[in-house]
Each structure stands twice: as C-alpha cells, then as structure tokens.
Amino acid sequence: MIIVLMGVSGVGKTTVGKRLAQRLEIPFHEGDDFHSPDNIAKMERGEPLNERDRTPWIESLQNCIETLLANGQQAVIACSALKADYRQQLGGGHDRVEFVLLKGSRALIQERLNQREDHFMAASLLNSQMEALEAPADSLVVEVDKTPEAIVESIVDGLDLAQP
C-alpha cells in the first residue's frame, strides 16, 4: 500500500509521515524533494505555484508511485495533493493507493507555519493553499490538533493497519 498524506503546508505531513512510516516499517518519501529548484525559489519568495509549475512535480511523484507499485513496494508519501486532478494522477482509483487528508483550523496551521524554521514554504502562502484545497470525499480525514503519535494512531486505526 502507498499512503499519501495530503493537506496544506503546516498540517504535519512530514512529521506524521516519518512516524507513520517508522511505525509500519516502510519507506518515507518527502514530496517536497520532487520540486524543482525554480519551484522552491518561487515559494521562498511567497509566490504561489501555478499549474505550469506543478505539472512536472506531480509527474515526478506519479512516476515514483508507479515504480513503487510496479515493484510491489509500500511507502508513505507526504504530498499536498490539494486538487482532485492531482490525486487522480497520483494513483487515485488504484486499490493500493490511500489518501489521508490531514486537516486543522486555519489558526492552528498559521501558528505552526509562523513557528517553523528552515522550510522554504512562506507562511503567507497558507491562504492560497486553503483556497486551492479540494477536500476528498472518499478519503480518511484526520484532525491534526493532537500529538503526532495520536495522529499516527488515528491513521493506523482508520486504515485498519494494526498488526495482529
């Protein structure tokens, strides 16, 4: 199974993703690592990405997921996947790809972004991300107002991944 943790910047995709991958003993892939240097520079300047910017990024992630699936591998991937079209391209409809929306209040996420250091995503981009988010109707939704460990447990329980 490929678990894609999705949501706006600041919901904890990386923190939770790493812990979930460790709990499940499978690899973790950071979606931000698939961005081009130009995309990162643009986001550092506080400029939202456009579709032209996102297309090669989504294609790179799609190739990663297809390779993992073809090799029968499992993984946790952190990726905003804000739009339904992106999720479809990334493997939506495939029975081995699960999307989990990490969701929190605007105030909580803004507070996290304001406290975050050493990340290229400008906190000012939260509004554009929240506006772009097309919440999936058929995915697990987990509120992020608890500890990372509790969020991991909610995902494990929600996807019925508990080991016997």
Image (spheres, grey):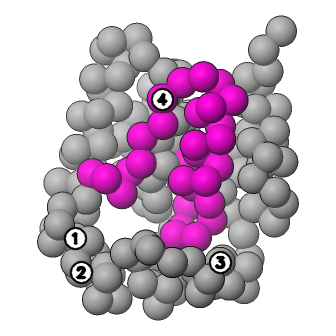
**Between disc 2 and disc 4, whose residue precedes?**
4
Whether the magenta-drawn stretch holds residue 58 is answered as: no
Q: Which residue is tagged 3?
A: 112
The span shown in magenta is 5-34
Q: Which residue is tagged 4?
A: 27
Judging from the image, what secondary structure is the residue with disc 2 in? helix
Question: What's the residue type where badge 4 is placed?
Answer: Pro
Question: What's the residue type where badge 3 is placed?
Answer: Arg
Judging from the image, what secondary structure is the residue with disc 3 in? helix
**Between disc 1 and disc 4, whose residue precedes?**
4
Q: Nearer the viewer, mark 1 or mark 4?
A: 4
Label 3 crowd (10 A; few <14 / some 14-19 / many >=20): some
Question: What's the residue type where badge 2 is placed?
Answer: Lys
Q: Which mark is residue 18?
A: none
Left or right: where does residue 135 sit relative to residue 30? right
Q: Which residue is tagged 2?
A: 42
Judging from the image, what secondary structure is the residue with disc 1 in? helix
Q: Which residue is tagged 1?
A: 39
Whether the magenta-drawn stretch holds residue 13 is answered as: yes
